[in-house]
Amino acid sequence: MHTSPSNSPLTMNTGADQDRRSTAAKIRHFFFGETPSDTWLSTAVNCFMTATLLALIWFPLRRTFANVEINYNEGWNAYRAAMVASGIPLYGTPPHGFGTGTAYPPVSFHLIGWLGTPSTFTATGRWVSLISLMVTGVFVSLIVRRAGGSQQMAVFSFLLYEIGIALLRPDRIGMNDPQLLGEALSVAGLYFYFRNPDSNRHLCVSALLFCLAGFTKPNLLAFPAAVAIDLLLRSRRAFATWAGAMVVSGGLLTAMILRDRSCLVDLRFPFAQGGGVRVCLKPPPRISAGRWIWC
């Protein structure tokens, strides 16, 4: 009686080994998102990009902790934080002393005024800007991962964002300015929408974060507009939920700001003459960063 080649022990063992290798490859692809032959190349690219990022960000990081002025906006933003901390209205106060009237929304000024002191407003703003840069990169990688990208691709996306900022706007890194804080909030809103666009809870969180971003920097409109268009194409009901949450969040933020009079605009001021409008406010405190003082 002859044994069939397909049923021989050698053939069966070879087939079992191939099945095990195939199963292991599938498991690796499921967890890491790429085949083993591509892993070394992805790792090499990410290592090269990490070295590039460290080379590009080294000087901005050292400058962040140095007693040098990065941009005149740092002093302007520090004075606005001091106004909030002193209870001086941001928008109802006539321009005097330092610079012009307040041109930015108030969230960053309230945050810096709450976290810092008159002697640390600039340093606190720099820390917030630096942390916001890292947080934005993390949310970018999470969005890529949520979209089905591999871990290597998520790391690549994080590094690509950070390198892009370091190349195009190195002055923003570690600078007391609300731009990067607003970007972090905006990308966080996009992530929570992308995480589950059918969840009312995630839609509300996304709307709140987008509102906070808009109340931090008014030019961050791209992501909310993209989400609104996508929702209109996907589900009118979800769009109504998201838009309603945007209106409620914006209303609550406006009410909280108006309550402490830091966003109260006195429209009569430009037309007031003599004793028409009287503003009795104490000047903001001196703002310092380390050993030196901006006055």
Image (cartoon, rainbow, N blue to C red):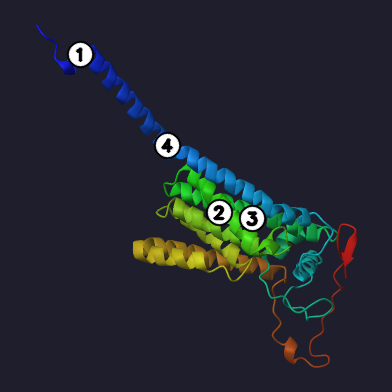
Q: Amino acid at mark 4?
A: Ser
The residue wearing badge 4 is 37
Q: Secondary structure at mark 1?
A: loop
Kindly indicate whether the residue at mark 2 contacts the one at mark 1 (C-beta within 8 angstroms).
Answer: no
Q: Amino acid at mark 1?
A: Ser
Q: Nearer the viewer, mark 1 or mark 2?
A: 1
Q: Secondary structure at mark 3?
A: helix
Q: Secondary structure at mark 4?
A: helix
Q: Is residue 174 above or below residue 259?
A: above
Residue 171 lies in quadrant: bottom right
Q: Residues within 10 Å of mark 4 (few under 14, many from 20)?
A: few
Q: Amino acid at mark 2?
A: Leu
Q: Nearer the viewer, mark 4 or mark 3?
A: 4
Residue 54 appears at what percent x and percent y?
67, 49
First in sequence: mark 4 vs mark 2: 4
Q: Amino acid at mark 3?
A: Leu
The residue wearing badge 2 is 160
Disc sitting over residue 8 in the figure? 1
First in sequence: mark 2 vs mark 3: 3
The residue wearing badge 3 is 133
Closer-to-camera residue (69/4): 4
Say which residue appears at 76% left-offset and 61% top-offset. Answer: 113
Q: Residues within 10 Å of mark 3 (few under 14, many from 20)?
A: many
Residue 110 lies in quadrant: bottom right
Q: CA distance from mark 3 to mark 1?
A: 62 Å
First in sequence: mark 1 vs mark 2: 1
First in sequence: mark 1 vs mark 4: 1
